Image: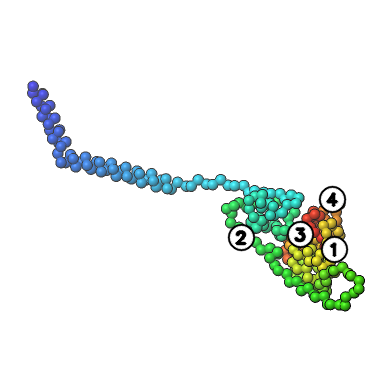
């Protein structure tokens, strides 16, 4: 009986102590500390996630293209969903966008790549001598073929250092009014000068906005040419190119 009474007294004291204001304050303090620890852990976790480095993007290997027979920059650009201007800007080894060599390796630029625009010789406007008006004469009783009058061939009025200047130096018989390289064949034909697609030694070859001098015709379907401004202004170069890549002035 005495032990039971003592146990009951101790239980009452414990319950009273647990319900006292000091006990409640201690419990609240522990809960607050636990809450602060959880908030700090959450912040540390968030900061840790923010500090993680971004995964590096895999490097994309550059796309190489080998120039084939009959290729042009425009056709190559269409195959790779880009423009010839971007291919020209990417490949500094191309001196003239109208002239690419079979077997030459080109790098196709990535769509997201930032490229600086390159200036070409084609953008230089060369002065052309005006066509001289044919003086009227008394009509002959015999009809004659109507041929446009040629411009003067005296001197060399093409811009010095460019392909047209060199072509005129090699063919001083040609007139000074053929304009930019891109119009040489059409203007020569209009003035009655023979033109065609068959290569001949001594002919002037035109491809796009570039003209060359045919040094010799080879037996394998190629020609040996010389020209100026292929590798830079005033620079004269000699190359072997496909014969069907040019149209000719004889």
> Which sits earlier in the primary sequence, circle 3 or circle 2?
2
Q: Identify the residue position indicated by label 4 in the image.
A: 220
Q: Position of residue 114 (x, y in %)?
A: 58, 56
> Which sits earlier in the primary sequence, circle 1 or circle 3?
1
> Which sits earlier in the primary sequence, circle 3 or circle 4?
3
**CA separation, marks 3 and 2?**
25 Å
Residue 14: image tag = none
3 vs 2, front mark: 3
The answer to whether 208 is drawn above or below residue 174 in the figure is above
Q: Nearer the viewer, residue 2 or 164?
A: 164
Q: Identify the residue position indicated by label 3 in the image.
A: 207
Answer left or right for 91 relative to 228.
Answer: left
Q: Nearer the viewer, residue 98 or 23?
A: 98
Residue found at the very far front of the displayed protein: 141
Q: Can residue 213 be seen?
A: no
**Secondary structure under badge 4?**
loop
Q: Identify the residue position indicated by label 1 in the image.
A: 194
Q: Identify the residue position indicated by label 2 in the image.
A: 116
3 vs 4, front mark: 3
């Amino acid at each position: 009986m005495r032990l039971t009474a003592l146990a009951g007294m101790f239980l009452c004291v414990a319950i009273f102590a647990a319900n006292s204001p000091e006990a409640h304050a201690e419990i609240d303090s522990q809960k607050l500390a636990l809450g602060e620890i959880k908030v700090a852990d959450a912040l540390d976790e968030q900061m840790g996630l923010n500090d993680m480095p971004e995964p590096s993007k895999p490097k994309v290997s550059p796309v190489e293209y080998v120039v084939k027979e009959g290729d042009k920059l425009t056709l190559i650009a269409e195959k790779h969903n880009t423009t010839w201007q971007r291919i020209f800007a990417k490949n500094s080894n191309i001196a003239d966008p109208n002239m690419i060599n079979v077997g030459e390796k080109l790098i196709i630029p990535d769509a997201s790549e930032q490229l600086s625009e390159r200036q070409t010789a084609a953008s230089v406007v060369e002065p052309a001598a005006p066509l001289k008006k044919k003086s009227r004469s008394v009509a002959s009783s015999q009809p004659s073929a109507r041929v446009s009058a040629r411009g003067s061939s005296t001197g060399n009025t093409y811009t010095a250092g460019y392909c047209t200047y060199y072509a005129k130096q090699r063919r001083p018989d040609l007139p000074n009014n053929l304009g930019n390289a891109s119009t040489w064949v059409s203007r020569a034909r209009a003035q009655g000068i023979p033109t065609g697609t068959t290569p001949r030694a001594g002919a002037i070859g035109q491809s796009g906005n570039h003209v060359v001098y045919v040094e010799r015709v080879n037996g394998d379907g190629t020609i040996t040419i010389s020209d100026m401004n292929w590798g830079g202004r005033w620079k004269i170069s000699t190359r072997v190119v496909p014969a069907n890549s040019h149209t000719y002035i004889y």
